[in-house]
Image (tube, rainbow, N blue to C red):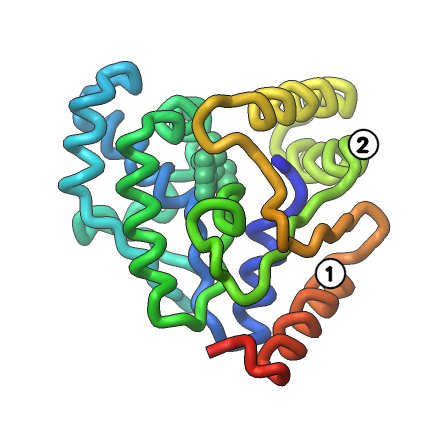
Amino acid sequence: PAGAGKSTIARLVARELGYIYVDTGAMYRAVTLCMIRAGLKADQEDAVGDLAEKLEIQLRTGTDGQIVLADGRDVTREIRTTEVAQLVPAVAKIERVRRLMVVKQRTMAAEGGVVMDGRDIGSKVLPDAEVKIFLTASLEERARRRYEELKQADADVTYERVLRDLAERDEIDRTRKVSPLVVAEDAYVLDTSDLTIPEVVEIIVARCRKAMEQGAVR
Ligand code: DC
């Protein structure tokens, strides 16, 4: 769910294993940014689908984390603006956009050696992934973490407000028609409410190494 720490943890696990980190949220963000630039709105589904089909998205590992390229241009920073964040859920709901992203994600994972982060990876994109982790934490703890993060940039933010927003997002995620948030049957559910970041990374890396020892990983 939102605020469980997916990207932080996935990035660190990838670094520890020497794998490539694939942030699938960044791909939906890149489509959204290009949609805005093209003067399109998310309800123009056919046009946004055409744009997504033509768009070349590349994820590269840079010294400071992942670099996102859209048609060869570096959009790493711009995909993190509030404008993109507000519009991306509507774009991520377009079925044709999802189908296109899933194809790209499967291609990226085909060679192995990737840690892929996203809410539908274990359940839909890579049903045969060798290790699946469903990262979660209590609503209160996720709100606390998000609040700590936000209050540095915004003095007006309150914990209650963050808690309410997250509860709303949980509900939308669980009940949405396209790719609702579900736990893959064979995923390991890891509740991080009472764990530190290094502890979570250690648990996941240990599971990966065990899978490698057992020959489950190519
Ligand atoms: O994790 P994030 O905030 O960067 O995700 C951006 C948006 O994309 C968010 O609305 C969730 C959506 N998303 C998705 O639907 N499926 C994914 N695999 C990754 C992200």
> Residue 153, how many percent across, how many down?
61, 33
Residue name at image x 56 percent, y 82 percent: 215
Relative to 86, is 129 above or below?
below
Q: Position of residue 127 (x, y in %)?
A: 48, 54
**Relative to the observer, which residue lies in front, 27 or 206?**
206
Judge whether 115 appears above or below 8 on screen.
Answer: below
Q: Residue furthest right?
A: 194
In the picture, measured across the screen, residue 13 lies left or right of residue 146, that is left
Where does label 2 land, which residue? 140
Q: Residue at x 60, y 54 (%)?
A: 8
Choose top left, top right, bottom left or bottom right for residue 86.
top left
- Counting residues from the start of the chain, the first of labels 1 and 2 encountered is 2
Q: State the CA–CA distance, disc 1 to disc 2.
A: 18 Å
Q: Residue furthest top?
A: 43
Q: Amino acid at mark 1?
A: Val
Kindly identify the amino acid type of the residue bearing the numbered disc 2: Glu
* Residue 39 sits above or below residue 107 on the image: above
Q: Which residue is mark 1?
A: 200
The percent coordinates of residue 6 (x first, y second) are 60, 49
Q: Is residue 173 left or right of residue 111?
A: right
